[in-house]
Image (spheres, grey):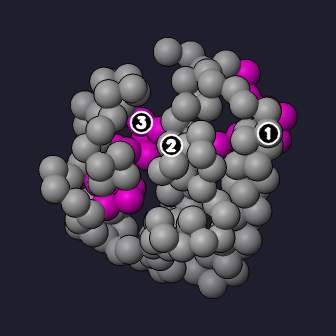
Amino acid sequence: MAPKKFDPGFEPALTPQEMLEHGVFGGWYFEGNHAEFPKSWFKNAKLSDDGFDVSLNCFDIESGQSRDVWQEKGWITKEDPLGWFQWYCRYFTGRRLPDVDSFQIKRWRSFGPRHAAQIRKNCEPGDIFCRRRQRQGLLQWAYDPFI
């Protein structure tokens, strides 16, 4: 399924399928319920059958805040109660909600550049074990974690 045109300036490096195949959110982001998305996305995904499993994350590390923190910070919208990745998956498949899209794209833009800059500043090129938490975070926001 080809996505609709993305908002100018929103250029994720990874598709939802690629993110799932690399290993994100301990394999449990959708809590086992992913029927609304293409089956092909989950064919080679690293998924858990019964809860968060850090070993399913690409960098074998926890990264990010809990859903409770997301709610406290106002990062959860009623349209996407599971957060940014749920929004991205829906956006990728063509859903457009201008206010929600603007909010989530703004969050995406603010995340990647600052974390990628820290990796570039503090890590040798090619050392994917340097700053694993930030790399996992980049992956979970559809940025290239292998910079």
Compare residues 74 and 90 and report the one nearer the observer: 74
Q: Earlier in the sequence, mark 3 or mark 1?
A: 3
* Circle 3 or circle 2, nearest the eye: 2
Residue 66 point in image, percent of width and height: 45, 71
Q: CA distance from mark 3 to mark 1?
A: 25 Å
**Disc 1 element:** helix
User: Where does the image place residue 123, in percent across and percent down from the top left?
Assistant: 58, 80
Residue type at mark 2 is Gln
The residue indicated by pointer 3 is 17
- What span is colored magenta in the figure? 5-27
Q: Is residue 28 left or right of residue 115?
A: left
Whether residues under marks 1 and 2 lie with C-beta atoms below 8 angstroms apart, the answer is no
Asked whether residue 17 is drawn in magenta, I would say: yes
Examine the image and state in which quarter residue 112 appears.
Answer: bottom right
Q: Nearer the viewer, mark 1 or mark 2?
A: 1
Residue shown at 73% from the left, 21% from the top: 5
Q: Tell me the element at label 2.
A: helix
Q: In the current view of this chain or complex, which residue is farthest to the right?
A: 8
Residue 63 in sight here:
yes
Along the line of sight, which residue is nearer the eye, 132 or 42? 42
Residue at image point 25% right, 44% down: 32
User: Quick one: which residue is furthest to the top in this view?
Assistant: 1
Q: Quadrant of residue 117?
A: bottom right
Residue 11, numbered circle: none
What number is the disc on residue 86? 2
Image disc number at residue 99: 1
